[in-house]
Image (cartoon, helix red, strand yellow):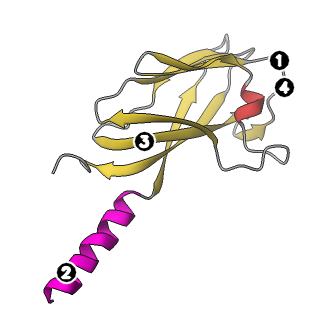
Amino acid sequence: MNGREQKHMEEIRRAYQLGRHAKGFTLQLNAQGTGSIDLNLSGFDSMFLGLVVAKADGGSKVDFIPGADAFTLKVNNDVVIDQADPYFFSASDQNPRDFVPFMRPIFGNDDIELTYNGAAQATLSIVVYYLGSPNLNRG
């Protein structure tokens, strides 16, 4: 491979690394409908883009009831979402976006925590979207 081809391959590799990625998490709420989870993206440098949440009860997807539940999202002690209704952050016919954007820089050792206060025991599926790849800015 000549120098020009090698440079082109490096540019393609970097563009791929900077592309959008997704990581899924599951949060099992207790009998009172509360719980918290560390949304660990350890080793990833770049940009937290946002998230989407879904709720299941007994394995079946259920719709969020507006006003019944609330959650808080903190990224490195910055309260990004404060006791907001998850209905507005879920994928549905009313909200066809992939995710709700809340862009924040991340550095690989971040504290990203979601705390949930609901009305009943359930399982939450959370997908976090971010840019970058492991150790992108470290080497």
**SS at mark 3 in the image:** strand
Q: Name the residue under label 2.
A: 6
- Using the image as rendered, state which of residue 95 and residue 66 is in the foreground: 95
Q: Residue at the spot x=33%, y=72% of the render?
A: 12
**SS at mark 2 in the image:** helix
* Image mark for residue 109: none
Going by the numbered disc 4, the residue's amino acid type is Ile
- Is residue 8 part of the magenta span, yes or no? yes
Going by the numbered disc 1, the residue's amino acid type is Gly
Q: Which dot, 3 or 4, sits closer to the camera?
A: 3
* Earlier-in-chain disc, 2 versus 4: 2
**SS at mark 4 in the image:** loop
Q: Residue at the spot x=36%, y=43% of the render?
A: 46
Q: Please provide the residue range marked out in magenta.
A: 1-18
Q: Name the residue under label 3.
A: 47
Q: How far apart are labels 1 and 3 at the CA level?
A: 30 Å
Going by the numbered disc 3, the residue's amino acid type is Met
Mark 3 surroundings within 10 Å by alpha-carbon count, few (fewer than 14), some (14 through 19), many (20 or more): some
Q: How far apart are labels 2 and 3 at the CA level?
A: 27 Å
Left or right placement of residue 127 versus residue 47 in this view: right
- Most extreme residue toward the bottom, as rendered? 1
Q: How far apart are labels 2 and 4 at the CA level?
A: 54 Å
Q: Residue at the spot x=33%, y=52% of the render?
A: 133
